[in-house]
Image (cartoon, helix red, strand yellow):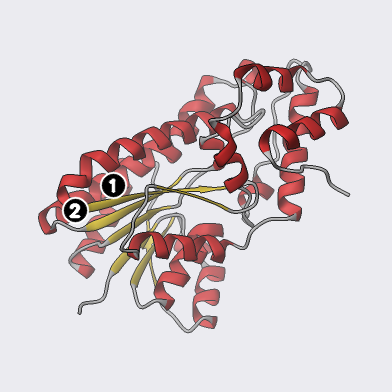
Amino acid sequence: MSQDVSVVTGANSGIGRATAIHLAQQGHRVFGTVRSTAKAEKLQAMAAAAGVDVELTELDVADDDSVRAGFAEILRQAGRVDHLVNSAGVGGNAVAEECPPSLYNDVFNVNVSGVVRCAQAVLPQMRERGSGSIVNITSIAGRIAALAQSPYVASKWALEGVSEGMAQELAPFGIRVVIIEPGVTKSAIFAKNIDVPNSTGAYDAHYRRMFQFYAAGIANSTDPFDVARVIEEAITTDEPKLRHPVSWGGEEMASRHDRIADADWLELGRIEDDDVYTERFREILGVDIRTP
């Protein structure tokens, strides 16, 4: 049986790096896409320590020409792609009033259009073979409108819709679509995602509570290799399912989302006292965001 060929975007950190290494450990031939191969030393060191090889491809998911060229080279080398894991992504903190439209555009270009670009690059040969899988990593923020992260939330909700549509579109061709919905996972994205506009000064509590959520999450965050194992199981199981909530907060919040009454959601937003907010958050969403 021939070796599966997997492409993992955003392979330089977090879930992408862990997935690239884990799939290589499972015997896949893995191409990890990075924006700069010169900055991939940690990925290469971790792969070497794990006794595997991850082949690097320089590619920027936000750029049409870069995606076309990168996947053309992968297909030239490997002949096909069996699994595409769309892990590349960026954060975006802002309430809607303070978020410039350009930030929405920038976040969407990576988190939504980047996924579409990469999928379009591999789907023709998957359709021709009648097999393959596309894994789109959204977020629990794609199910719950996480506070003060309007551009990020909007992009992940959009990616949920794109992914759900793709699943039905591609089912006749034998192509599996998987949605991975992480809560808080150990990743460099959080260290890079600490800026907030706060241009009006009216939303201090919103930003404070957003950071409180992530402070609690980081203290309890899930190892990205745990997510990688979920991804590997999702693309190999004989009993596939579309959505896989994972990591700290993911399963609890995903399972409760559709049961939250609109009145309870709005009431949560009106609470002024942080301690009361934290307790009500736990009651509604099942996640304790208190920190020592």
Instruction: Please report the residue visible at 33 percent of the width from the left and 59 percent of the height from the top.
Output: 239
Q: Residue furthest bottom?
A: 51
Query: Between residues 223 and 176, which one lies in front from this camera angle?
Result: 176
Residue type, label 2: Gly
Return the x and y of residue 219 as percentages of the image width and height: 76, 54
Task: Say if residue 63 shows up in the picture.
Answer: no
Instruction: Please report the residue visible at 46 percent of the width from the left and 71 percent of the height from the top.
Output: 22
Return the x and y of residue 242 as percentages of the image width and height: 37, 47
Q: Is residue 155 left or right of residue 121?
A: right
Residue type, label 1: Ala
In the rendered view, tell whether residue 68 sits above or below residue 207. below
Instruction: Please report the residue visible at 42 percent of the width from the left and 37 percent of the height from the top.
Output: 160
Return the x and y of residue 83 as percentages of the image width and height: 30, 60
Mark number, residue 119: 1
Mark number, residue 174: 2
Q: Residues within 10 Å of mark 2 (few under 14, many from 20)?
A: some
Mark number, residue 26: none
Q: Is residue 136 left or right of residue 220?
A: left
